[in-house]
Amino acid sequence: MSFVGVLVLAVAVIPKLSLALGRIAARVGGVPAELATENTQRNPGRAASTVSALLVGVTLIVMMAVGAASTQASANKALDKHFPTDAIVETGSGPVTDRLLTAVKNTRGVAGAGTISTTGPVTMTTGGKSQKMTAIGYSADAIASLRDPGKLAQLDDRHALVSKPGVSTGQTVTVSSGGRSVSLTAIAVESGDESAGSSIALSGSVLKRLVPGAGGSQILVRYAQGTTSSEVTAAITKAISAIPGASVTSAADSRAQIEQVVTIMLALVVGLLAISVVIALVGVGNTLGLSVLERTREIGLLRALGLTRSQVRAMFGHEAVLESVAAVVVGLVLGTGYGIAGCYALLRSEGMDVVVSLPLLRLVAVAAIALAAGWFASIIPGRHAARVLPSVALAGE
């Protein structure tokens, strides 16, 4: 409904924008640009109808491009939050061995890998109260392998991440197990699901001090930039195939699937762009062609006053480009707004945080192609106008 209103108001918006842009263009384009600017003001309805198809096309394409880019960025953020690592390697039985860790690290396409250890309940004491908690130990390599480490980036031998109501950041907590204990500063984190129980995250070295026999339970893996996730996952699977019970689960494959969907959407955008360019060529060309017939005597008078054929062609080119620029500006603003609004409407309903991403290179390409289409549509009408003889202005009816 808002876009229908924009089309109705285009009669006022397009000429005003063309006038503002024409004043700038006149400094560069000279007399043809000045005449083109005046022509855009003489018939506002014709100016709006000339570029209406281009306005619709640009708005639709920009909306799709911004929506696709924002959807991909939002989905990647959600995956980074829930699956902050590209892949997880684990064994069905027993702890992670050095052999398994070495095999993963040496796999081509792996940028980093580190172990995490999960051990039975440890006792955490704070404020005179003790409670049993599950302890998870993160090695430095494991934290470095996370795409979104979040508060885990603050984890070291002096701090612990505590997921327990009533524990606040800065409190001193004492963690003990088997007669061994260590005092740490708590960093409070929200539990994603309280029913999942309470846990405390420790650095790998602290967990080994508390539970010397604790072995790695999982390997967190990060893929190198520029690699194909499916190929790296297959390489890891092959590398660990000789180790009984070892398996790999890849979140990077989910990212790749999302990127594939976005690629298909962008392919549709390219198709829409091609259609809109054709429509714009036909619409702008037809309107300018009719204006040549309507302004034959006027063009002849301009030729009699000294306007050259090249200046006549330039006048029509400036007129088409000015109106196209106005349509592109409005289309970029509207399409960006509609794309962002669409993401909020669709993604928020799924409980996802929206990350606004503007694909600048694609938007620049859309604007350049639309302007080129507008100028190209003026070539044939401009040639016809340049052939009008000065004597036409003096001919009687």
Image (cartoon, rainbow, N blue to C red):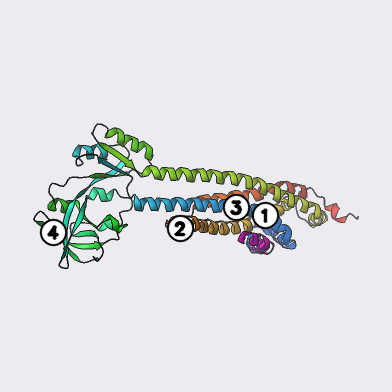
* Amino acid at circle 2: Arg
Q: Amino acid at mark 3?
A: Val
Query: Would you say residue 307 is visible in this rendering?
Result: yes
Q: Which residue is mark 4?
A: 182
x then y, percent, for residue 225: 36, 44
The label nearer to you, 3 versus 2, is 2
Q: Earlier in the sequence, mark 2 or mark 1?
A: 1
Residue behind mark 3: 58
In the rendered structure, which disc, 1 or 4, sits on the residue that comes first in sequence?
Answer: 1
Which quadrant of the figure has residue 397? bottom right
> Dot 4 lies on which element?
strand
Quickly name the residue at label 1. Answer: 51
Q: Alpha-carbon distance for marks 2 and 1?
A: 35 Å
Left or right of residue 328: residue 317 = right
Secondary structure under badge 1? helix
Q: Which residues are magenta?
A: 1-17
User: Who comes first in sequence, dot 3 or dot 2?
Assistant: 3
In the picture, which quadrant includes the N terminus? bottom right
Instruction: Tell me the crowding category of disc 2: few under 14, some 14 to 19, or many 20 or more residues within 10 angstroms, Cα based.
Output: few
Marker count (numbered): 4
Please, is residue 165 above or below residue 220 in the view?
below
Tag 1: Cα neighbours inside 10 Å, few (<14), some, or many (≥20)?
Answer: many
Q: Which residue is identified by label 2? A: 348
Closer-to-camera residue (153/199)? 199
Q: Residue at x 83, y 53 (%)?
A: 390
Most common secondary structure along the magenta stretch: helix
Distance from disc 2 to disc 4, alpha carbons, whole Å, reads: 43 Å
